[in-house]
Amino acid sequence: MTRRFLSLFAILLATASLLHADTTNATLVQSAILENNVAYLRVGQVEKNLAEGISAAQHAPATTNKIIGTILDLRFADGDDLAAAKAAADLFAGQKLPLAILVNSQTRSAAAALATSLREARDGLILGGAAGELKPDIAVTVNAADERAFFKNPYAATVPAETNSSPATNNFPQFIDHTSEADLVRAKIKDGEQDEDSLPSRPAEPQKPFIHDPVLARAVDLIKALVIVRQPRR
């Protein structure tokens, strides 16, 4: 009886350890797909199993889209495991798609070391605010309160705050004009350029979500621009 109890206890203990490991990896990296083809990975803490967490996020079922580049968000990230930072950097080393790394003044220790390694070994471009001695390749100034709000929900519009930063860095449009082709045809009809009967029937297009986070939006634009520049010329 005692031997059977110990065997069951050992099995339960092993199962609990596996579940804990899986949960740890899952919470280390949050992932999403932006604009249908840009992989977004957010890291909160650089610690053991980070490379495994990134790899799992990159191979998740949701990433079956044809990915054109990756954004690694290290804003507000910390950690003291330099070995984990190196393992994560080595993981990206073999990948050839464009890589953008997001940092801010709260990117510290092993997270800052990871950003530096990726810039040096992987030609990754760093965007955002300065993180100590780590200076971004593309500086994007954001009010601290707004940045925290954007970090929680990059699609949420915030009320403009009075800051000492340059207006050009934060004046992002709060909407996108999604004028459909049918609307353009109607405008031409009013000008007498086309017959009403020739107007194609087309349902109104729903407005697409707009990224209000200026750092993240800049990174998405950068990834798309790099893909265009790197396309082989015919």
Image: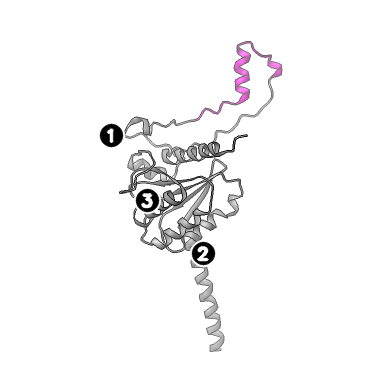
**Magenta-span inclusion, residue 185:** yes
Query: Element under label 3?
Result: loop
Sequence-earlier tag: 2 or 3: 2
Q: Amino acid at mark 2?
A: Asp
Image mark for residue 22: 2
Residue furthest right as drawn = 197
Sequence-earlier tag: 1 or 2: 2
Magenta range: 176-198
Marks 2 and 3 in Cβ contact (< 8 Å) = no
Sequence-earlier tag: 1 or 3: 3
Image mark for residue 164: 1
Image mark for residue 76: 3
- Residue 97 located left or right of residue 197: left
Marks 1 and 2 in Cβ contact (< 8 Å) = no
How many numbered tags mark residues here?
3
Q: Amino acid at mark 3?
A: Phe
Q: In front here: 172 or 105?
A: 105
Mark 2 nearby-residue class (10 Å; few <14, some 14–19, many ≥20): some
What distance separates the C-alpha of mark 1 from that of mark 2?
44 Å
Marks 1 and 3 in Cβ contact (< 8 Å) = no
In this rendering, the answer to whether 225 lies above or below 27 is above
Query: Element under label 2?
Result: helix
What distance separates the C-alpha of mark 1 from that of mark 3?
22 Å
Question: x, y (%) of residue 230?
Answer: 54, 39
Q: Quadrant of the C terminus?
A: top right
What distance separates the C-alpha of mark 2 from that of mark 3?
23 Å
Question: x, y (%) of residue 101?
Answer: 43, 47
Q: Amino acid at mark 1?
A: Asn
